[in-house]
Amino acid sequence: MCRRRILFPIALCVAVLAACGGSGPAAPFTGDPLYLTNGPDSSSHTGPSSGQTSNASRTVTGWVLGMGPAGDTANYTRVSGTVVTLRLPDDFATNTRGQQVASATSGADGTFSLGTVKPGPYILEATAPSSSSYRVTHWGFVITEYAPSRIELGVVLYRR
């Protein structure tokens, strides 16, 4: 049953499409994104009971939101200038950091594009500009063979 699970976070950030090989902003997201935060989240979803699987690369896009003052979850704002990095998991046996797979900086509207990545385990790191009131956040997730061809990530940044 483990193979039928899709585990992945949703990150929000502005795209630096030139760094990712894109030529313009990502198409607007039309579904419900999955959000991954440092608290309870929706990072685990049941995969299809049957159907096609694929090891083809997936397009990863999203946006970055900052939490309102005093933990106010009703007043999220889009955060520009956030560096979103996708890397492989750390290797604790050799005490080495995972290799970087993709990186993008969120634009004025908080959106980003990480290009295409193959199914597998990843660490997502979102680093807001040093002048902002938000802290760095990290999430681990897996893109399985059941994941859709386009993955929308919604990253919520917490205040320092």
Image: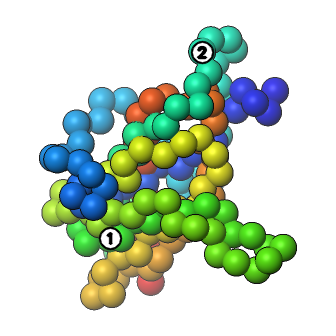
Image x and y of residue 80, in percent = 23, 68
Q: Nearer the viewer, mark 1 or mark 2?
A: 2
Q: Is residue 70 visible?
A: no
Q: Please name whichever residue, 121 or 134, is drawn nearer the observer in this view of the structure.
A: 121
State the residue at coordinates (49%, 37%).
57
Residue 62 percent coordinates (x, y): 35, 49
- Please tell me which residue is depicted at 68% across the width and 11% down the height of the picture: 50
User: In the figure, is residue 110 to the left or right of 47?
Assistant: left
Q: At 15% from the left edge and 47% from the top edge, which residue is drawn?
A: 24
- The colour mode here is rainbow
User: SS at mark 1?
Assistant: loop
The image quadrant of residue 126 is bottom left
Residue 158, how many percent across, how many down? 45, 71
Task: Name the residue type under label 1.
Answer: Thr
For marks 1 and 2, give the CA distance.
35 Å
Residue bearing mark 1: 82
Give coordinates of residue 138: x percent, y percent: 55, 68
Of residue 87 and residue 107, the one placed in the foreground of this image is 87
- Answer left or right for 83 relative to 3: left
- Type of the residue with mark 2: Gln
The answer, for residue 114, to whether it is visible in the render is: yes
Say which element carries label 2: loop
| Res 156 quadrant in image | bottom left
Local crowd size for mark 2, using a 10 Å CA cut-off: few (<14), some (14–19), many (≥20)? few
Q: Are marks 1 and 2 in contact (CB under 8 Å)?
A: no
Mark 2 sits on what residue?
A: 52
Quarter placement of the C terminus: bottom left
- Residue placed furthest toward the bottom: 131
Viewport quadrant of the N terminus: top right
